[in-house]
Image (spheres, helix red, strand yellow):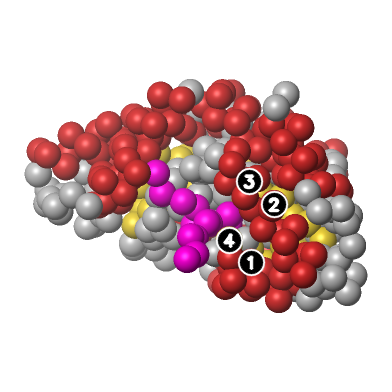
């Protein structure tokens, strides 16, 4: 017999309340019944984003919200600054290039963060930059960027700060209004504890001025259409009805727990995970700016990284993520976001120990579990 455990940074496990909501009979989206749900969701999303601005719901993966940000804020030939420190920073660059926006790239070494002073220096040299694109949590490296520090820089300029919070929102504190972040995008399948299928985007008043000026072609991801519909508690196109209903349940769970408690829970799980790895003779990929949503770990010498992840999944039912891009086969990633408990983490570490031991890695059996438990008992 084999049970399955999902410890990947998206998709993440679904709570029973979400599964129950997804099993309900479908309803029509142009009805008072759905409108009641949508109104609740719209207000609850504002709490999750920590904003008074509208949060638009798109039927797509998180990349759809990223594309929406580019095409609604910018025009052909505009300059944008991209903080690129991993696979998803690269995605901002690719999206800009696809629409004729000229990206100026700050290449950050994978596994490292960026000092906001460097951003400030770039913007001083290039006053024509209209938007700065960053990630909150770079899922491919396990790095959390200093969004508060970046916002302090962009507030003093004409540039808007656009943040990919797809794998961070709902796990890591991001105060959109208080910090002065202009655009935040996210997705359903990570901290929000839902299946893939919904994306979210919120836009500040400063950034909305760029929406009014943008000349990029757009239709499905047109935020002007989204706003017209949102103002009437509606959607411009057919939404993923079942996932919106499930989102309402997930947001109720999050509000009941309290966002401060959610952030503290994620930090504790992250600390436990990070304590376990050195105890097993493993090194963390990021130490100075590690994310509380996902931990990236270097594969030790002599161990096949892809085989490690595959064996945990196929033989023991524990799915972690491998490395991406240039770190493929060199990293594995353990997620501790969303509907993850202390014992999910303990089980994942125990499985990792078993497979590493079978593959010949030298360490004291049980050391990782012990180190994690010591953190969790505090």
The residue under label 1 is: 312
Q: Are marks 3 and 2 in contact (CB under 8 Å)?
A: yes
Q: CA distance from mark 1 to mark 2?
A: 11 Å
Q: How many neighbours does mark 1 have within 10 angstroms: few (below 14), some (14-19), or many (20 or more)?
A: many
Q: CA distance from mark 3 to mark 4?
A: 11 Å
Q: CA distance from mark 3 to mark 1?
A: 14 Å
As helix, strand or loop, the secondary structure at mark 3 comes to helix
Q: Which residue is rendered at x = 37% and y = 38% of the image?
A: 250
The residue under label 2 is: 349
Task: Locate residue 1 relative to residue 95 in the image: left or right.
Answer: left
As helix, strand or loop, the secondary structure at mark 1 comes to helix
Q: Are marks 1 and 2 in contact (CB under 8 Å)?
A: no
As helix, strand or loop, the secondary structure at mark 2 comes to helix
Answer with the quarter of the image where residue 74 lies. bottom right
The residue under label 4 is: 318
Dominant SS type (magenta): loop
């Amino acid at each position: 017999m084999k049970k399955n455990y999902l410890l990947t940074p998206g998709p993440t496990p679904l709570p029973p309340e979400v599964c129950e909501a997804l099993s309900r009979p479908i309803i029509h989206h142009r009805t008072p019944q759905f409108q009641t749900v949508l109104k609740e969701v719209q207000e609850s999303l504002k709490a999750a984003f920590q904003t008074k601005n509208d949060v638009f719901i798109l039927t797509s993966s998180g990349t759809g919200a990223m594309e929406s940000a580019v095409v609604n804020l910018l025009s052909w030939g505009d300059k944008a600054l991209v903080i690129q420190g991993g696979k998803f920073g690269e995605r901002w660059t690719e999206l800009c290039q696809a629409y004729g926006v000229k990206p100026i790239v700050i290449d950050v070494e994978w596994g490292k963060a960026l000092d906001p002073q460097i951003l400030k220096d770039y913007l001083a040299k290039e006053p024509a930059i209209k938007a700065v694109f960053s990630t909150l949590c770079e899922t491919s490296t396990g790095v959390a960027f200093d969004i508060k520090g970046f916002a302090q820089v962009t507030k003093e300029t004409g540039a808007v700060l656009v943040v990919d919070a797809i794998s961070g929102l709902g796990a890591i504190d991001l105060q959109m209004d208080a910090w002065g972040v202009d655009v935040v995008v996210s997705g359903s399948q990570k901290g929000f504890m839902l299946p893939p299928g919904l994306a979210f985007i919120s836009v500040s008043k400063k950034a909305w001025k760029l929406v009014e000026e943008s000349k990029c072609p757009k239709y499905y991801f047109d935020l002007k259409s989204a706003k017209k519909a949102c103002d009437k508690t509606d959607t411009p196109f057919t939404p993923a009805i079942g996932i919106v209903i499930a989102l309402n349940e997930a947001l109720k769970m999050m509000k009941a727990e309290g966002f401060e408690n959610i952030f503290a829970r994620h930090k504790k799980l992250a600390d436990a995970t990070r304590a376990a790895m050195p105890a097993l003779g493993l090194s963390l990929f990021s130490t100075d700016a590690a994310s509380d949503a996902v931990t990236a770990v270097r594969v030790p010498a002599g161990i096949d990284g892809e085989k490690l992840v595959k064996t945990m999944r196929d033989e023991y039912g524990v799915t972690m993520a491998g490395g991406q891009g240039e770190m493929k086969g060199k990293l594995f990633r353990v997620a501790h976001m969303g509907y993850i408990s202390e014992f999910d983490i303990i089980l994942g570490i125990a499985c990792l120990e078993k497979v590493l031991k079978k593959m010949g890695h030298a360490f004291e059996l049980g050391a990782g579990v012990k180190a994690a438990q010591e953190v969790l008992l505090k």
